[in-house]
């Protein structure tokens, strides 16, 4: 009997418990407008409420009821919900706020979500709840005045355009608010009704800044149009709504990243309290969170907004979806071609080629005729002229034309051959300089990329430190940590700021180097496009195939041998040695057997008496007189017998030079073999680094997240969090640099073999790859 009684009690308790858990709460929602874009937010709110209420009740949501920004409709909607079967009413939007404020009494629990800016709410400092039966307000620290102060701290605007939803000026005394705010300011403002499509191009006028005070419900397309219009006009902008606006291209905001989540959690907790019997009048009104000033770096660059180092400690720098690209954003190929076309060092080397061409012309000119003409006027003592018999008059003028034509000279012929070889050697000197310049451009490009990535990572690390500082402050306020933790992170924040400033300056120095190599004005604003293995320009870099060969101990020596052979075939340094050898050997032959070859030249002259006068100008009768014009021709053959032993000395000198060049050739061969082997090993290391650093970065990120969470709960000491942050920073840098270092090592290898893939056609590159494959297979 007793067991039956106990069983009955158990079943009764179970039934009562089940009945309690199965209680249904119906929630009605009042909204000014329920757009498609806001549907995900509504779903997120419903999920949050359901999760928080849990097993206390089954929550049923009614479809949102819209008022379309009409106050009478808002009042009617509220009364209709109040008369329905809903248990709790959630109200959103300015119009609903006003309607409920005018209602005064509330038959059912109502939660009003703070869409009204706090500038319009004047509460006593000690008032924490509404104190009105069945209504709770959630008031967030949204303030137009504080936003405008923060905006002015970033940019001292003169006339700001304030964008508001068209219904707002009629619903709230917004004009009076801004009139009061700007009454004692140097700046002015103009109210602009925000069009539904976001296009404000016709109403911008003379404003120099934009404050987005409305537009929370704008569609994605309209917001994109709005942001594009603002940025195209290079207007600094500030949003009152959310950080996501900044991520989409607005310049700045004072709203933190997670306020929506915080709002929804607060709403859910209030609903849970009401379900459990708490009167809404007893629920806290104020929703506290810290404002965080955020700025979009890409937008700042696009609108040429001046960024100050002093911002780094107080402003969160974010990227953005607009991904601004500088007008002078260079890829690696752009820099390669720019260096070849505009580098001053290469331009000077090209002049050396022109000068060597002139030397060839000079050498060849020895076989061109040498024609000269002269005129002579003579005045002779008349006493002498008188007795000359007409041969030497007192006054006479004459002209002479002379011709010298070298028919053959071993020295002149050798000079042509020598100068032609020296010209070809000079061309190879230029080719080597061009390869070096292209490599220098590649190094400058990857250095800029590495420093750019380092600056980005240092900026992210600064944000991590800000977050850690925030956690330490929360722990200190909760009594879970000492003030020393807060001071430690403040100190680290200052150090991180300094590191970020240095990283930015180093990046600018790298840009200076790129500008110098490309003969740009040094202060030209440039950027460098990212380089990713197997993507973009490097899509034809057979990374995996190359890795497979390098990772195979049997194939790697064959690849090295092929690369050494290609390098020796292509090396301009070896070709330069070859042409210098040819010139030296020709000089040697000139001073050995060539000294026995005679020099043959043709000479001619024509003389013409132009005029004769004065004493002795008349010939004596009977004496023959030479004609006015006379000529002569001669053939000259010369052979040096002994030229102060210079021939033997020059011969010996040429032999020494030949030996020297051969030694240099052997040294270059050895250097090529050493460099190829070393660079292949470097590539092997970099490939391994790519794999390892990626794993290390992922592990370090997970470790940092876990350590931050543990520190926020007081489970780990400060030093462990700092170690986790430092480890993540270092692994980020190593992972980012591994990709660039591999590509840089590839560029260095291409310079060593004298062949840059990016500067050659696809067909030529395929032919190179086929040669490599054939060579490697032939060795197996």
Image: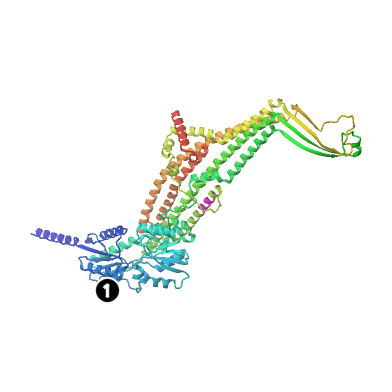
Most distant residue in the left direction: 1
Highlighted magenta segment, given as a residue range: 505-513
Residue 563: x and y in percent read 49, 34
Residue 98: x and y in percent read 31, 70
Looking at the rendered structure, the secondary structure element under dot 1 is loop
Q: Is 269 or 34 nearer to us in this picture?
A: 34
Q: Is 435 or 674 nearer to us in this picture?
A: 435
The residue pinned by badge 1 equals: 104
Please name the predominant secondary structure of the magenta segment in the image.
helix
At 80% from the left and 34% from the top, the residue drawn is 608
Residue 204, picture quadrant: bottom left
At 74% from the left and 32% from the top, the residue drawn is 403
Q: Is residue 145 above or below residue 706?
A: below
* Residue 511 is covered by the magenta coloring: yes
Residue 735: x and y in percent read 43, 47
Residue 666, picture quadrant: top right
């Amino acid at each position: 009997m007793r067991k039956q009684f106990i069983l009955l009690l158990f079943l009764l308790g179970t039934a009562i418990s089940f009945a309690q858990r199965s209680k249904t709460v119906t929630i009605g929602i009042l909204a000014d407008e329920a757009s498609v874009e806001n549907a995900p937010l509504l779903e997120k709110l419903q999920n949050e409420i359901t999760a928080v209420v849990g097993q206390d009740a089954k929550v049923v949501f009614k479809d949102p009821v819209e008022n379309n920004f009409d106050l009478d409709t808002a009042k009617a909607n509220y009364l209709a919900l109040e008369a329905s079967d809903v248990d709790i009413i959630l109200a959103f939007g300015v119009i609903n706020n006003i309607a409920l404020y005018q209602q005064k009494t509330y038959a059912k629990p109502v939660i009003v979500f703070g869409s009204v800016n706090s500038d319009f709410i004047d509460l006593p400092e000690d008032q924490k709840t509404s104190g009105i039966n069945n209504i709770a307000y959630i008031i967030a620290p949204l303030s137009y005045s504080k936003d405008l102060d923060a905006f002015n701290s970033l940019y001292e605007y003169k006339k700001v355009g304030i964008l508001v939803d068209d219904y707002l000026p009629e619903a709230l005394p917004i004009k009076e608010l801004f009139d009061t705010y700007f009454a004692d300011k140097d700046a002015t403002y103009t109210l602009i009704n925000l069009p539904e499509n976001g296009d404000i191009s016709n109403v911008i006028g003379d404003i120099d800044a934009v404050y987005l005070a409305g537009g929370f419900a704008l569609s994605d397309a309209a917001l994109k149009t709005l942001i594009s219009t603002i940025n195209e006009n290079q207007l600094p902008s500030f949003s009152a709504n959310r950080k996501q606006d900044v991520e989409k291209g607005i310049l700045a905001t004072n709203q933190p990243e997670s306020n929506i989540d915080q709002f929804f959690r607060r709403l859910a907790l209030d609903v849970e309290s009401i379900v459990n019997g708490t009167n809404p009048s007893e629920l806290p009104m104020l929703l506290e969170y810290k404002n965080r000033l955020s700025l979009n770096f890409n937008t700042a660059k696009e609108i040429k907004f001046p960024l100050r180092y002093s911002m780094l400690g107080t402003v969160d720098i974010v990227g953005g979806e607009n991904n601004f690209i500088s007008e002078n954003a260079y890829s690696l190929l752009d820099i390669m071609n720019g260096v070849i076309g505009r580098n001053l060092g290469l331009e000077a080397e090209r002049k050396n080629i022109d000068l060597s061409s002139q030397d060839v012309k000079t050498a060849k000119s020895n076989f061109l005729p040498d024609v000269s003409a002269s005129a002579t006027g003579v005045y002779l003592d008349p006493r002498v002229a008188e007795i000359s018999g007409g041969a030497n008059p007192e006054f006479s003028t004459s002209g002479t034309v002379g011709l010298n034509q070298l028919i053959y000279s071993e020295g002149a012929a050798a000079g042509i051959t020598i100068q032609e070889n020296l010209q070809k050697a000079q061309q190879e000197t230029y080719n080597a300089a061009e390869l070096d310049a292209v490599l220098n451009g590649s190094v400058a490009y990857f250095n800029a990329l590495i420093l750019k990535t380092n600056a980005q990572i240092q900026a992210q690390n600064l944000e991590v430190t800000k977050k850690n500082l925030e956690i330490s402050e929360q722990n200190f306020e909760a009594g879970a940590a000492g003030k020393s933790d807060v001071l430690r992170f403040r100190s680290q924040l200052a150090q991180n700021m300094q590191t970020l400033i240095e990283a930015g300056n180093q990046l600018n120095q790298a840009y200076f180097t790129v500008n110098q190599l490309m003969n740009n004005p040094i202060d030209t604003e440039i950027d460098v496009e990212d380089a990713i293995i197997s993507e973009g320009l490097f899509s034809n870099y057979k990374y995996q195939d190359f890795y497979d060969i390098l990772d195979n101990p049997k194939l790697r020596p064959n690849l090295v041998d092929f690369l050494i052979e290609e390098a020796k075939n292509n090396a301009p340094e070896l070709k330069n040695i070859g042409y210098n050898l040819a010139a030296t050997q020709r000089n040697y032959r000139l001073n050995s057997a060539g000294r026995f070859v005679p020099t043959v030249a043709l000479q001619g002259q024509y003389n013409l008496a132009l005029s004769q006068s004065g004493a002795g100008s008349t010939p004596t009768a009977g004496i023959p007189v030479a004609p006015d014009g006379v000529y002569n021709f001669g053939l000259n053959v010369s052979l040096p017998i002994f030229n102060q032993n210079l021939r033997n000395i020059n011969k010996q000198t040429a032999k020494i030079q030949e030996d020297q060049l051969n030694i240099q050739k052997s040294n270059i061969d050895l250097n090529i073999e050493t460099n190829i082997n070393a660079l292949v090993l470097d590539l092997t290391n970099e490939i391994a680094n790519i794999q390892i650093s990626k794993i290390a970065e992922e592990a370090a990120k997970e470790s940092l997240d876990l350590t931050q969470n543990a520190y926020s709960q007081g489970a780990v000491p400060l030093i462990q969090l700092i170690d986790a942050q430092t480890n993540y920073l270092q692994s980020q840098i190593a992972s980012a640099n591994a990709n660039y270092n591999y590509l840089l090592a590839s560029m260095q290898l291409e310079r060593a073999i004298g062949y840059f893939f990016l500067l050659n056609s696809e067909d030529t590159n395929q032919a190179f790859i086929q040669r490599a494959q054939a060579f490697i297979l032939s060795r197996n």
